[in-house]
Image (tube, coloured by chain):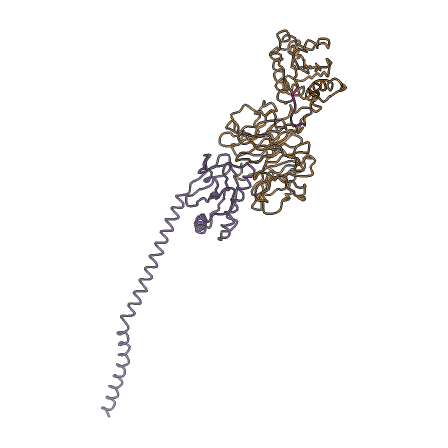
Amino acid sequence: MMLKRFLPFVLLLFFISVPSAEARVYLDINAPTFVQIPIVLSKWKSVNKTPPTLTAKVYEILANDLTLSGFFKVMDYHHLLPSLQGKEGIPGTIFLQDWMPVGGEILLAGEASLEAESTTLKLTFHLFDLVEQKHLVGKEYESHLQNLRFMVHRMADEVVLQVTGEKGVHNTKIAYAGLQGGGKEIFFADFDGANIKQLTQNQSINLSPAWSPDGKKIAFTSYLKRNPDLYLVDTDGKNLHRFSSYPGLNVSPSWSPDGKQITLMMGMEGKSDIYLIDANGNNPKKLTKGHGNEASPRWSPDGQSVTFVSDRSGTPQIYIMARDGSNVRRLTYEGNYNTNPSWSPKGDRIAFCGRVGGRFNTFTIGVDGSGLRRLTSNSGDNESPCWSPDGRYIAFSSTRTGVSKIYVMNANGFNQRALTTSKGGESSPAWSPRFD
Amino acid sequence: MIRKSLSIMILVLCIGLMITGCPKKTVITEEPSAKKEDASRLEAERAREEKSREEKSKDDQAAKEFEKSLVAKKYPGIEGEVLESKLLKDIYFDFDNYDIRPQDVGIVKENTTLLMKYPNVKIQIEGHCDERGTVEYNLALGERRANSAKKYLLSLGISADRISTISYGKERPFDPGQNEEAWAKNRRAHFVILSK
């Protein structure tokens, strides 16, 4: 009874007593659950010759980004009290109390500036702590109009940094294989699902895209020459060339963090094994031994280990081995079909796909084998999880709507949303590194 | 004196007759059986010729049938054209398995016989899976299925340089259905002839 009375008081104390230095942590994003921060987005001001439609677009992308991040409950100005709807631009601190009744904890205000005859867009935003009624941070971005989305994503990243202590991933991209015609092509989209780019147009079967650590190239498998060979292409579609064409499988590539080597599945000896090759396709080295079928290798973020699938125990399970193939140990012991491992960039957990009751679901497990967590259920088949570069999101494919689409969720399973508005046929997501 | 030489002459004549006469006798008595042997030898030869002509025409027919059965197949987005034949049959696998099933051994043997007949033919064995299971692990399973069939052919005497393998995993289902029947059809090793 006493505790109940004290609790709200204690929380308030926390927010007040923590010194207002930069990047105050409001949220523990590693917790299994967290409460979203209500953030008020007041109407942006159009300065100089900025068309209001342009400012509205900036606002829309920003509001969407903050919602997609999963950390915020965005309070859009359209839904505020009429007296607040019209308040645009950046308020002085003394006016912050106007925003108190709204129930938000943070206020984001901004303005867009485009000079006459100019293609240079300037975006300014300020963050305010409504509980403490103080200014948190203000930043300005300036770039060519065509970089509008990039700038807004930058702002969203900054807001996420302020609230969570870690920059957002709004400028990253997700590659995937998509059905087209009778084949599968490689695509990639922005984190918010916009700007879908098609990387291959060969009407063949193209699979398992993987970004290079510098984000400049994508490796993928294609059946173009009647063998599953490995190809490389720049992210602008140029310099497409084959670089690993050993007889049999050359599939499921994964780059070492230093970009010098690639681990992949190869079938040279009549069954699938995990191999290591140089980034140019030379010097294949077999890592796995024994009679099992080995699949889906993925590097650890420190470049010292590889996680992979093996059915050497009788059923496909997740394993870990050192980069030279030694020290093999089994990670999963529950269920009889566990595949598609992906190592969190934070180093501590591995996501994978496990079959339960005939359906595939996404799980994460500690690298030491503890803390198994199930992230999807009752939503069709959920496969091929992969992590965002900050380790706070997981992209995966799901057939929950009847067709296969790429979904994104927070690493604790919250806020699952479809990446694009496509009709389906998407699979095998691969998250880019940060570009900035 | 003349009578003596005459008797001798008659004697010689008689002996001569006897000598020349005997063989004739021998010939006479042997003629029917030799004729029989010749005839049966001839018959046998004729029969053999007939048979080899038949066989040759059967072979010709078979070759024509085989040639007729060859259908060119181009896979969109995949280089090259291959030939398929109803006479080169698929074999099927149990779920999650890549062993040659006992009921398919006969089919593999039939395929082998065909390949023995046409020593210039090179084939590719495709390994396929049903749509259940994840993409990459199924590529590994398909690789095993193709190689399992290849190993069996090698054990029956087909040389390795005539066989290549390829795994399509679950990417090229034969039957797009989502039921047991379709899945069973998709778990297969498919044989195609590589165009020379």
With A410 as the anchor, is A224 left or right in this view?
left
Q: Is residue B113 above or below residue B5?
A: above
Residue at the bottom extreme of this rendering: B1
Which chain is rendered purple in the image?
A: B
> Where in the figure is residue A164, as x and y percent of width and height?
69, 23
With A40 as the anchor, is B135 left or right in this view?
left
> Where in the figure is residue A244, as x and y percent of width and height?
60, 39
The region drawn magenta spans A31-36
Q: What kind of secondary structure does the magenta stretch mostly adopt?
A: loop
Q: Is residue A192 magenta?
A: no
Q: Is residue A9 above or below residue B181?
A: above
Q: Is residue A229 visible?
A: no
Quadrant containing the C terminus of chain A is: top right
Residue at the front extreme of this rendering: A1
> Where in the figure is residue A61, as x and y percent of width and height?
61, 18
Quadrant containing the N terminus of chain A is: top right
Residue at x-position 77% and y-position 19%: A19
Q: Nearer the viewer, residue B3 or A67?
A: A67
Chain A: its colour in the image is orange
Residue at the left extreme of this rendering: B3
